[in-house]
Amino acid sequence: MKYVGILLMSGALIAGGFLAAERLRERLRILQQFRQIALCLKGQILYSNATLPEALGEAGARFSEGRSGTAREPGELLLRVRDRLKQESGRPFSEVWEEELARLPEDLPLEKQDRQALSALGSQLGYADRAMQERTILLYLEQTEDSIRDLKGELDGRTKLCRCMGMAAGLFLMVVMA
């Protein structure tokens, strides 16, 4: 019975390493999705002359349909902001944006700087003219591109490290407990 317990604990440690590696990949996918959303918003605002709630609704619908789990959350964020802007007309966009950002799940694989970039996007997006909104979106795109590029450069090494650390911890536990 003791050995079964050791095997189960070791297996959990190994699985934890693989889950940590998958979380890195999920962060990359979410960042890429937010980049696509920013491009969509830019197109809607600049080329379709859509109002901000219309642009949020279009982008939100596009990036939430047919998705599930964490991949659905960025599109849902936009739809929630759009709905609140319609319901609470007169409230500043930046306040609604911040409140909805705070409602993002804690398990969404975004780091502090990712959330800060999203916060900065919302603080500048809702009150200015089209040219300023374009510059705000371009700044967000640049920050997101930097994060994606850095993450892609580190991804293979960090993924291997997470997996190896999980396996090493599992094996260490087996040796110590056996």
Image: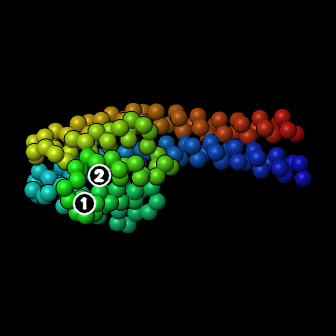
- Residue at image point 68% right, 44% down: 14
Residue type, numbered disc 1: Glu
- Identity of the residue drawn at 47% across and 37% down: 155
How far across and how far down the image is residue 48, in percent?
Answer: 11, 58
Residue pictured at 14% horizontal, 57% vertical: 51
Label disc, if present, on residue 120 of the rendered structure: none
Give residue 5's position: percent from left, percent from top.
83, 50
Label 2 with label 1: CB-CB less than 8 Å:
yes
x, y (%) of residue 169? 71, 36
Residue 128's quadrant in the figure?
top left
- Up/down of 160 relative to 55, above or below: above
- Disc 1 marks which residue? 88
Q: Name the residue under label 2.
A: 96
Q: Residues within 10 Å of mark 1 (few under 14, many from 20)?
A: few
Label 1: state its secondary structure.
loop
Q: Is residue 168 visible?
A: yes
Crowd rating for badge 2 (residues with CA inside 10 Å; few <14, some 14–19, many 20+): some
Q: Which residue is drawn at 10% across and 45% down?
A: 129
